[in-house]
Image: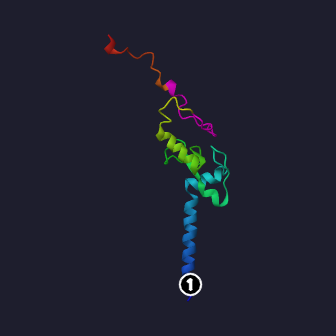
Amino acid sequence: MRPKKRRLDPERKARFLAEVRKSQALREKTYREQALKLFPHVCAWCGREFSGKDLHELTVHHKDSNHMNNPPDGSNWELLCVHCHEEEHLGERKGGYFDSDAPDDRPAQSLGYQPFEGLGNLLKPDDDTPPDSESS
């Protein structure tokens, strides 16, 4: 025997629709939704295009690994598919940053972000620093 379908009363339906609209408005303010509006729906590494049902497989990667750094212009974000995003984070744990002999076969950053640009200049000692006192 089939259960009877209950009709949703108009007041309850209005409350439900208001909640849906409110959650949609909040979701549109998230950095993922902002990034999806700013960038084409393409993985920055593998170039795969996403649309429709597959769009959930496209993730936002924070270039500086700081999830609180969400500038409205999207300069700290890149869209990566779940597979490339996982590879990015696995690479960090496997020693990609510490193993100098490891080949860097990742594609170049599409937006020109270079995290260590100018680091050599910051590490050079100043000319007016006194010599090491232990050597004398």
Q: For the stretch drawn in magenta, what is the main secondary structure?
A: loop
| Image point (56%, 60%), residue name | 27
Q: Is residue 87 visible?
A: yes
Which of these two is toward me, 28 or 53? 53
| Image point (64%, 45%), residue name | 46
Dot 1, crowdedness within 10 Å: few (<14), some or many (≥20)? few
Report which residue position mark 1 lands on: 9
Residue 79 part of the magenta segment:
no
| Image point (45%, 16%), residue name | 127
Quadrant the N terminus occupies:
bottom right
Q: Secondary structure at mark 1?
A: loop
Which of these two is toward me, 128 or 56? 56
Residue type beneath disc 1: Asp
Say whether residue 130 is left or right of residue 8: left
Which of these two is toward me, 104 or 119? 104
Q: Is residue 84 above or below residue 108?
A: below
In x, y percent, where is residue 128? 43, 16
- Looking at the rendering, the stretch of residues picked out in magenta corresponds to 104-121
In x, y percent, where is residue 121? 51, 24
Number of disc labels: 1
Q: Is residue 35 above or below residue 25?
A: above
In x, y percent, where is residue 75? 59, 43
Say whether residue 60 is left or right of residue 94: right
Say whether residue 58 is left or right of residue 124: right
Which of these two is toward me, 79 or 82? 82
